[in-house]
Structure formats: structure tokens, C-alpha cells
Image (tube, grey):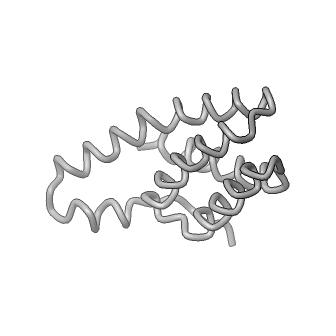
Amino acid sequence: MKEIPNLEYINQLSKANLELKKRLITVLKTEFPNEVKIYETNMASYHYKEAAENVHKLKHKIALLGLEKGYDITRNFEEQLKKDRNESQGEFEKILINIKIFLDKL
């Protein structure tokens, strides 16, 4: 079964504070696309160490969106990139696509 991004963790963090929830979502919607673009640029240039830093930042957003398996995949991919390997790239990029679709609908 495919893991689906959700707001459960954000809801837990913000509790009844709707303003905080809105700010967290705004940060996600603003930063996520920019971080993905930088990641894609680094990957296209085979700058795997820099891409690992991008993946590290994205990993936290993946966790915020409740993707436990996605977080594990991302953590593994980050370690691969540090060793100039990219075996999990396709799996990681599927997660990015799912998040983009989810954020576009918010």
C-alpha cells in the first residue's frame, strides 16, 4: 500500500492553534518546491554531496507530512548520496511527486 502525505503530525503540533497550522503549511508550500528545484539541479550536475544536503532538508518535510516509510527511504538515499551512489533515487523522487500533488491540493 502506497503511503499518502497527511496533516496528522502538523495537527498534533499545532493542536487547536489554527494560525500555527496555517504557518506550517505555508512554510511547506513555499520551501518544498524551491528545495526540490535545488535538489534536481544538483542531481543533474552529479553533485551528490550537495544533493545529500538538499535531501536532508527535504527529509524533515517528509516527516512533517507523516510519511514514515518515506522518511526511511529518504534517510537511506541521503546516506547513499554521501557515498556518491543513487540507487534509491527513483523511489525518493516518487515521494517528492506525491508530496507535490498533496501540497497543490491544500
Image quarter of the C terminus: top left
Q: Residue at x 59, y 43 (%)?
A: 53
Where residue 42 appears, as percent x and y from the top left, is 70, 30
The front one of 105 and 43 is 43
Q: Is residue 19 left or right of residue 79?
A: left
Where residue 71 appears, as percent x and y from the top left, is 58, 63
Q: Residue at x 31, y 47 (%)?
A: 24
Q: Is residue 46 left or right of residue 97?
A: right
Q: Residue at x 54, y 47 (%)?
A: 58
Which image quadrant for residue 30? top left
Where residue 18 appears, as percent x and y from the top left, is 17, 52
In the rendered view, tell whether residue 11 sits above or below residue 96: below
In the rendered view, tell whether residue 19 sits above or below residue 62: above
Which image quadrant for residue 101? top right
The front one of 70 and 16 is 70
Q: Is residue 35 left or right of residue 1?
A: left
In the rendered view, tell whether residue 43 sits above or below residue 82: above
Where residue 41 appears, as percent x and y from the top left, is 70, 27
Number of labels in the image equals: 0
Q: Residue at x 16, y 47 (%)?
A: 19
Q: Is residue 90 left or right of residue 78?
A: right
Image quarter of the N terminus: bottom right
